[in-house]
Image (spheres, coloured by chain):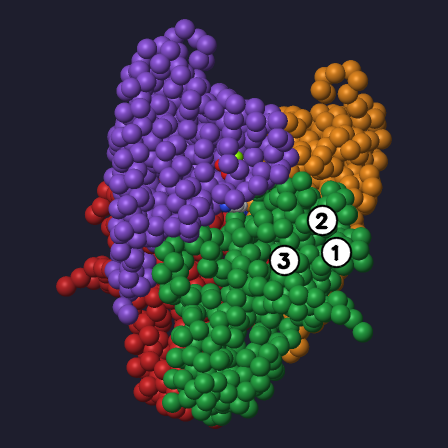
Chain colours: A orange, B purple, C green, D red
Amino acid sequence: MAEQSNAPKPDGAALVDIYRRMLRVERNDDAIRKTIRRGRLTMPYYSARGQEVIPATIGHLLNDEDQICTIYRGIQDMVAKDMPLRPLWAEIAGRVDGTCKGKGGPMHLTYPEMGIMVTTGIVGSSMPIANGLGWAAQLDGSKRVVVAFFGDGASNIGAFHEALNLASLWKLPVIFVCPNNGYGEHTSYNLATSVDKISTRAISYNMPGFTLDGNDPDDMYAHMSVAIERARAGEGPTLLECKTFRFLGHVLGDDDFYIPKEEKEAAIAKDPLPALRARLVAEGHANEEQLSKMQADLEAEIADAEEFGMNSPLPSVDELRRDVFAEEIAA
Amino acid sequence: MAEQSNAPKPDGAALVDIYRRMLRVERNDDAIRKTIRRGRLTMPYYSARGQEVIPATIGHLLNDEDQICTIYRGIQDMVAKDMPLRPLWAEIAGRVDGTCKGKGGPMHLTYPEMGIMVTTGIVGSSMPIANGLGWAAQLDGSKRVVVAFFGDGASNIGAFHEALNLASLWKLPVIFVCPNNGYGEHTSYNLATSVDKISTRAISYNMPGFTLDGNDPDDMYAHMSVAIERARAGEGPTLLECKTFRFLGHVLGDDDFYIPKEEKEAAIAKDPLPALRARLVAEGHANEEQLSKMQADLEAEIADAEEFGMNSPLPSVDELRRDVFAEEIAA
Amino acid sequence: MSGIQKMNGIQAINAAMVEAMEADPKVLVLGEDIADPQGGGVTGTMRGLSTQFGEHRVRTTPISEQAIIGAAIGAAMAGYKPVAEIMLMNFTTVAMDMIFNHAAKLRFMSGGQTSVPITIRTLTGAGWQTAGQHSDHLEGWFAHSAGIKVVCPSNPADMKGLLMSCIQDPDPCIFVENGMTLFAPGDVADDQGPIPLGKANVMVEGSDLTIISWSGQILRCQMALAGLAEAGISAELIDLRTISPWDKEAVLASVAKTGRALVVHEAVRNFGPGAEIASTISEELFGQLKAPVKRLGGAYCAVPFAKVLEDAFVPQPDDIIAAAKSLMG
Amino acid sequence: MSGIQKMNGIQAINAAMVEAMEADPKVLVLGEDIADPQGGGVTGTMRGLSTQFGEHRVRTTPISEQAIIGAAIGAAMAGYKPVAEIMLMNFTTVAMDMIFNHAAKLRFMSGGQTSVPITIRTLTGAGWQTAGQHSDHLEGWFAHSAGIKVVCPSNPADMKGLLMSCIQDPDPCIFVENGMTLFAPGDVADDQGPIPLGKANVMVEGSDLTIISWSGQILRCQMALAGLAEAGISAELIDLRTISPWDKEAVLASVAKTGRALVVHEAVRNFGPGAEIASTISEELFGQLKAPVKRLGGAYCAVPFAKVLEDAFVPQPDDIIAAAKSLMG
Ligand SMILES: Cc1ncc(C[n+]2csc(CCOP(=O)(O)OP(=O)(O)O)c2C)c(N)n1
Ligand SMILES: Cc1ncc(C[n+]2csc(CCOP(=O)(O)OP(=O)(O)O)c2C)c(N)n1
Ligand SMILES: [Mg+2]
Ligand SMILES: [Mg+2]
């Protein structure tokens, strides 16, 4: 599709915006990892370093009222969808100013104001819930769309099957986005998945499905634009398999023994972040100075958020009785 | 495949045997329904009247040591696989001589001696368990195969997806047989299933999948023979969607309001039982006298089984403490 | 003044649905066979709804319980009030992740930013010879799950009133229909409105002992009352109605008065919901009880098929009478 | 005489697996990341097994928990003894049908013709800030499920001995590893053999009250004992080890002696497994108790992320001390 001449193409401004979102994701990821390594954050952390093009392009193309359901490895999806960083940092620090008052933490970050509806720690579970949000959009007569993120490993769990079948039957405005990074925890794609391409599985649901280069902003932009249009037009869901790689293994501290060295090196050599930066400069969409300023601004925003988050107060133990139900439980 | 000249074909003796199994299923079904209508049996009953070619052909092709996992609508699968009728009737009557001592009943009939391993009342659940039996066959170095029966409605549940993926990955000797009767309870195929053919879903697992006429013994024989050979040869699973129709609705007493009259009438007009009988005579594989004798013998066997089952003693309440674990629970 | 109608649970539930859907366009219905062309649900409780309110609000689903609850959760988060049917309670097992890890927890995990006001209706109970995979009372599992309310009505009026409350409740509720009670007729006032969740119903007053029960076992307790009266035992019968949160105050007040308590449920006795009630009574009324708190529940086995075994699985009126008598010493 | 090794739970479980697999070629292992090229399981408990016994006996699976338990059930019915890992206990929810409706029931429903000797190993527990979907103690659900044994070891020696018994057991067992206990070292005899299921362990003898606990909470009870001793309270500590079937005799004998009982678990207190034990004690020792039976358990909410909240969710040594003191009156 991306090769077709009529495929939607990002213009210079779009590419710059995508790059900015990538950089916001990457700088934030870097800051989180540093803070964890310094022992100042104690959360489990699933970095998506290397996968930035996918959330950045999606963040660029979605509107504020569009919604996402993402997974434990989902902070990049939020950061690329303009989640404010102060409540994000307060949440991962387990503080009262966190989006979830410190109760959810990194695996359950939620921010409905920007359409960040669910972050799930259960493989596959983003998809059935995204359907419900899509059903609501349909009932509302709204044009908003819902993106369900899930991993390649998650394509083998029952919820995937049930959700894609229902979404297709009901023509729901849901886009199923699978960053295929080749591994589910330590298990490689081929050991877990019986078909060469996850996008092939779309056939089972009479749904359009595409495998694309998730590190290529043009390819991502083209396919995602079409999928969003289709969803907004009431034509139903799309399955997008976006090939990519996670540079830092499954969870922070993971020693990568299960990844062949050459595979990892080859992937890192194609790091999409410097590649897009170089392209922006080469194609004249931005100059070094602008990009350095962009980076400095983002780093300042992140530093401020970190400061804010780490200094937010700890929650009171009374919080155990709040938000279980709408009504507070008596002490 | 059935059209190919080299497709396995049933000879006259095979056709007669398939017919005999169909008749055993149908006569037994008839006797069960009569006994229920007379108020002598109180079980819920899911007749498979009209679907007989599928179990009969499979029963003909499987060996005694081959295994099946079937569903609530599964008595035909057992009867066609040479299950003795006395313990079957004692079970549906809830008596001590029942295969399950009256504890399982019609939805959980089990008879490992003839490879009838699991009858499940949970949609989709025959498939993951069949995989385990197939794994055991593989580990044993045995050539036995396992058939997992499930309905068209069941093709939309998560267990289907997980089971077919695993079976393909592990090259398990399992044949997934879906009698597609067009309905799951009162819901028609199109309302529940997003793809035209269930067999298309085999593509998702890189597995051979075929849609065939489940009322045609030649088509059934050809595809099932190949699937069995493939499984025995260690080449892995096959998905067979066998188009058919249930003449008597979902459960006995079902008034069929959800089935268009013409659809039902057209299906009944193509009743596979008299059709095969006529063919046997026309092609000279059996004459009327032989077929009448066959029927009389089967009816005698069924009458004996009914008599035996209905007169078997009721179980003692001590049975509640037995078979929970290997060791009896103390009173 | 409003009249009273005799109706069964199916009709009462249907009436609750019609009122709820008329009052609030955000109320949705989904489940297998749920729309009218498919029969309005396996017992017909939803009959007429898709015809009256349209198939966009009343949707028949595939046999995909995870997708059903997932769709309900998502719609609820976006402001709807979905009533999802899981045909039988044993099938909640295939949707348990959606119910337990998501519906029940999302409000808490999001720090109150999102909520999941869904009602899960489901049917269960021994007595139909549907055996091991179609009969279990699993309310104890859900009561042990923080964030979901568990409602087990015993009669048509309560079914109507409690279902209305579940639908209006801002949090997830599981509404358990017992097959025996669903078909038993009862009086329902024309203006029967919502019955508050978490409040028990003292059905019969008495002075010698308190029987605490719910759902289908209420019918058997009622049968036992006659036998107890004959034996000169005055039993107070409490229908708990809501299992979680349960009405501790009402139960403790009653047992404080009678000094004796018997908890009766169909769920398996071992590690069953009755243990919470019994141990709370024993703890809170320590030193005030005239006899140990007793519990009756289902046998520790799968629900058996044979009628004679199925009957033995469930506490029967005679078992209730015998247990009550044993408490009288 | 055999020696004693210091090892943690991971090593003890690994030792049990090696012995079981060497002794019986029918023992199989399956689960996510379970073979050596994937790391021998998420905590490395299965490390070395696929190398020693081959990948046909030790199979890494897709992320498909229904398929995992289904494969284990089928293989077990055909004579194997599979040990299936469900990485975390919250993920049992996606396999609940296979576990509850099938593994636990097939022997009964088949009238004893088939059996399902599988062991489901799973990991859980608060303390790692993995929050609402990765920390729940759900042993109460399984104890309420007829036909499956529930084992919750607290220390490396027990992990080895109890796991060996689970594998040898002719029926399905769920073996719950608590994250805290898994990494805590302990003494394991070189010849540590199977420890019988259903037998509790009186860890510390005492005369004033009996504390009944299991799994990770044993560690916190042990910490509390010092404080209690200081306060002049002599507590008997019972590690229940097996939750279902539980060792009623040992518990009742102890409480008959001390006259006071405190049940402590990490699972949510409401409708939790402690209620069965507490209500049984109250019923069976009615009139013999010096104080009401008390229960401590997890708060009624999802496990929270923030460390301060996570700590408050779980009963802490101070809570145990306070509860024990309150029983002394
Ligand atoms: C139902 C369930 N099973 C297992 C896990 C444990 N787990 C967490 S992440 C993960 C791997 C998922 O891989 P993939 O879907 O490819 O996503 P990625 O982590 O690569 O982004 C597993 C097995 C889980 N969270 N939920
Ligand atoms: C998980 C689950 N959901 C729902 C049901 C209720 N139910 C029993 S049979 C059935 C229809 C199944 O249809 P299909 O798979 O086409 O098989 P058929 O009955 O037509 O043979 C349903 C929904 C069930 N038994 N299990
Ligand atoms: Mg992956
Ligand atoms: Mg069907």
* Amino acid at pointer 3: Ile
Mark carried by residue C10: 3
Tell me if label 2 and label 1 are in contact, CB under 8 Å. yes
* Amino acid at pointer 1: Val
Which residue corresponds to mark 2? Answer: C48
SS of the residue under disc 1 = helix
- Of label 2 and label 1, which has the lower sequence position? 1
- Indicate whether A212 appears above or below C284: above
Q: Position of residue C291 (x, y in %)?
A: 42, 88
Q: Quadrant of residue D131?
A: bottom right
Tell me if label 3 and label 2 are in contact, CB under 8 Å. no
Mark 2, residues whose alpha carbon is within 10 Å: few (<14), some, or many (≥20)? some
Which residue sits at x=51%, y=29%?
Answer: B245
Which residue corresponds to mark 1? Answer: C18
Q: Position of residue C14 (x, y in %)?
A: 69, 56
* Amino acid at pointer 2: Gly
- The extreme top residue here reads B5
The chain that hosts pointer 2 is C
User: Do tags 3 and 1 sit on the same chain?
Assistant: yes
SS of the residue under disc 3 = helix
- Indicate whether C289 appears above or below D192: below
Q: Marks 3 and 2, Cα distance to the nearest angstrom?
A: 12 Å
Q: Marks 2 and 1, Cα distance to the nearest angstrom?
A: 9 Å
How many numbered marks does the figure carry? 3
Q: Marks 3 and 1, Cα distance to the nearest angstrom?
A: 12 Å
Would the CB of label 2 be found within 8 Å of ligand 2?
A: no
Q: Position of residue D225 (x, y in %)?
A: 41, 81
